[in-house]
């Protein structure tokens, strides 16, 4: 009985170690724009608003350029997309960005989910515990008949 309690406590302790896992996927699709000032310095952390073709009220995506002046988005239709850029200091641009082809490729399915990994790990632990338990029981039964 003591072994079972230790096993349960060990299992609960191990599950808390996985409380805040992080995963990532490499994405190889989308459209990137590099936004610079006229002296070729990147427009870092500038506000970006993207509008679908024919749409000027509801933005498709909003965000900021990175430290290199780059902003990425994945268009879902062809046409002339409107990109509004502003650095908040009076510099800005409205860009008409043509998209001729839309890639419907999605990233490859990642490996097993976190839940699947936890269940698999618990299954392995249970298997090892079961083999150990039956080995001990068999050893006890042999000594009982001797």
Image (cartoon, rainbow, N blue to C red):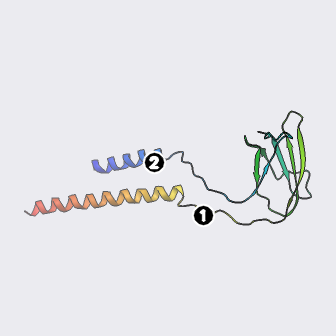
Which numbered disc covers residue 15? 2
List the residue tagged with mark 1. 109
Q: Is residue 7 left or right of residue 19?
A: left
Residue 69: image location, x then y, percent: 77, 43
Which residue is painted at 78% across and 45% down in the image? 63
Which residue is painted at 25% across and 61% down in the image? 134
Residue 10: image location, x then y, percent: 37, 47
User: Which quadrant of the structure image shows residue 109?
Assistant: bottom right
Residue 104 vertical position relative to residue 14 in the rendered view, above or below: below
Residue 67: image location, x then y, percent: 72, 40
Which residue is painted at 65% across and 62% down in the image? 107
Q: What secondary structure is found at the residue carrying circle 1?
A: loop
Callout 2 environment at 10 Å: few (<14), some (14 to 19), or many (20+)?
few
Residue 41 vertical position relative to residue 30 in the rendered view, above or below: above
Which residue is painted at 74% across and 58% down in the image? 30
Q: What secondary structure is found at the residue carrying circle 2?
A: helix
Q: In this view, does 64 lie to the left or right of 86?
A: left
Task: Name the residue at the front extreme.
Answer: 39
The CA distance from mark 2 to mark 1 is: 25 Å
Q: Which quadrant is home to the C terminus?
A: bottom left
Residue 122: image location, x then y, percent: 41, 56
Whichever of labels 2 and 1 marks the residue nearer the N terminus, that label is: 2
User: Which quadrant of the structure image shows residue 38?
Assistant: top right
């Amino acid at each position: 009985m003591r072994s079972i309690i230790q096993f349960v406590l060990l299992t609960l302790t191990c599950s808390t170690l996985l409380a805040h896992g992080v995963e990532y996927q490499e994405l190889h699709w989308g459209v990137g724009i590099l936004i610079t000032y006229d002296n070729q310095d990147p427009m870092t952390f500038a506000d970006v608003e993207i509008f679908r073709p024919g749409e000027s009220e509801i933005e498709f995506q909003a965000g900021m350029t990175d430290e290199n002046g780059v902003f990425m988005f994945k268009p879902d239709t062809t046409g002339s997309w409107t990109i509004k850029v502003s650095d908040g200091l009076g510099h800005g641009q409205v860009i008409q960005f043509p998209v001729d082809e839309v890639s419907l490729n999605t990233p490859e399915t990642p490996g097993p989910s976190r839940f699947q990994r936890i269940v698999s790990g618990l299954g392995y632990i249970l298997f090892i515990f079961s083999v150990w338990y039956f080995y001990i029981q068999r050893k006890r039964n042999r000594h009982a008949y001797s």
